[in-house]
Amino acid sequence: MKVNQLKAGALLSYLSMALGYLVSVIYTPVMLRLLGQNDYGLYNLVASVVSYLSVLNFGFGSTYIRYYSKYRVQEDHDNIAKLNGMFLIIFSAIGLIAVMAGSILGINADKIFGTELSYREMSKARILMMILVLNLAISFINLVFNTYITANEKFIFQKLVHMIKIILNPFLTLPVLFKGYGSVGMAVTTTVLNIIIEVINAFYCIRRLGMSFKFRNFDFKLMREMIVFSSYIFVNMIIDQINWNVDKYLLGRFHGTVAVAVYGLAAHINTYFINIMATISNVFVPRVHRLIADSDDNFKLTEIFTRIGRLQFILLSLILSGIVFFGRPFIHMWAGSDYNGSYVILLILVFSGVISTIQTIGIEIQRAKNMHKFRSILYAIIALGNLGISIPLSKMYAGAGAALGTALAIIIGNGFIMNWYYNKKVGIDIGYFWKHIFRFFPSLIIPVLTGIFIKLYINLYSPFKFISFVIIYTAIFGISIWFIGMNQYEKNLIKKPVDKILSKIKN
């Protein structure tokens, strides 16, 4: 059943992502035009500030999975109930703190956002901040139940709920936007939908999974142990917030909401790109924690690290090359000519994340081994460098300069230094990993040459030609990867489900 949950979870993850992208392709351009560039930029600016409060969860989600896996191996149900109770109390308290902190930020919005915002934008920013902070507080409580579902590997339910949320979001939001409620209406709708999702998750955990809570005999010793473990995850979260959200804040202060909107669209697309890479590794997180709890076999970990990395690289190379060859006309037709500047920013962001996005499972391996201290310290240093570089670059070159500062930090930290650490300290054979990644390169020659020809000689600003040549390019890429790049394990991931479907159709 666990294997089925993993396979079905991975399949549903990609179905939900495909559904999400389909919905986004239809919904986002309508939303952008209904909001307007200034209102969209304001929403992104406020969201980037509120997102800093998300670090208040201290990385306890990963900590929960680590201790839950430990107690589950020992079949210690009493400690699992205590763990559940402890986390519910902790996240409820954190949610309350987030609301209080958000209220302080809202009162001092003029000091936070500077002088580039108009009086009307500043007033709306205060309202948005309060709504988004409430949404964040709700998400903290939901994290208890969502993490429990992940720890129990109930990926089918989890992904189905996520797919329902994807479908409901535009259907609830668009009527609000059409009535002229703008970014405030969109924020309220998102918050209401998150409350509904939280109730569904809580009901499933308690009624179907038998999640139990014990609030007595609060284990302060365990609490201290978890705080020490989570402290470095907490540092990582702060660093990630600096690396991914400081750019919008700087652009808002130096250039106003329009610059934030242009950067925000590129960051929005890049988020989808990162999520695709993370989806494969996410379904293996409980397995990694169990493997390390049982045996801590570095050879098996290297195999998982490499296997997941190769699967991620297949998707990465298709999406990355697709952005290079088709990204500019796509943004122009999809979002409008006002967002043409997003293309360069998007290229900088996606290229900077190549190494880190095919090694996302490595983060969980470090956490499971309790070896994430180095990454936290390193990222703190890199983030300060990123901030120092991004301030002058964003002043001079707006969004592209801000993206370049972030890119340099990510390449140095996630790329070169972390690969050394994986190899020398964590026990992952990085030479073995890159050897198997480089085997894909010959299979990329034909697709890349095809893409260059299309970009040079085809007018992709016609929707019909754009769609036609995207299909042609994808087909050529798939054929080349199948016959030259993929190994038998990777082919079987496609062949076996297809064979089963064909067999059922024949029967």
Image (spheres, rainbow, N blue to C red):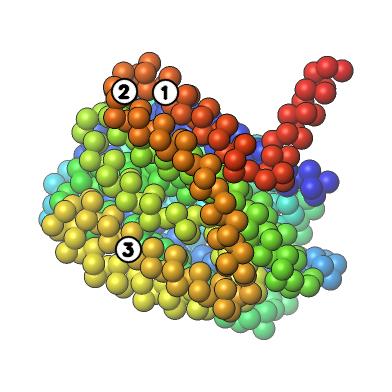
Disc number for residue 408 = 3
Find the distance from the CA under tag 2 to the CA under tag 3: 33 Å
CB atoms at circles 2 and 1 under 8 Å apart?
yes
Q: Residue at x 47, y 36 (%)?
A: 446
Q: Secondary structure at mark 1?
A: helix
Work out whether mark 2 precedes mark 3 in sequence or the reverse, and give the earlier one.
3
* Residue to which mark 1 is pinned: 469
Q: Amino acid at mark 2?
A: Ile
The quarter of the picture where residue 265 lies is top left
Find the distance from the CA under tag 2 to the CA under tag 1: 9 Å
Against 65, residue 269 (above or below) is above
Q: Secondary structure at mark 2?
A: loop
Q: Which percent across, then down, holds residue 62?
A: 61, 65
Left or right for 439, reference 106: right
Q: Which percent across, then down, holds residue 89?
A: 61, 66
The quarter of the picture where residue 353 lies is bottom left
Work out whether mark 2 precedes mark 1 in sequence or the reverse, and give the earlier one.
2
Q: Amino acid at mark 1?
A: Phe
Find the distance from the CA under tag 1 to the CA under tag 3: 33 Å
Q: Residue at x 48, y 24 (%)?
A: 471
Q: Nearer the viewer, residue 60 or 455?
A: 455
Q: Nearer the viewer, residue 468 or 112?
A: 468
* Residue to which mark 2 is pinned: 458
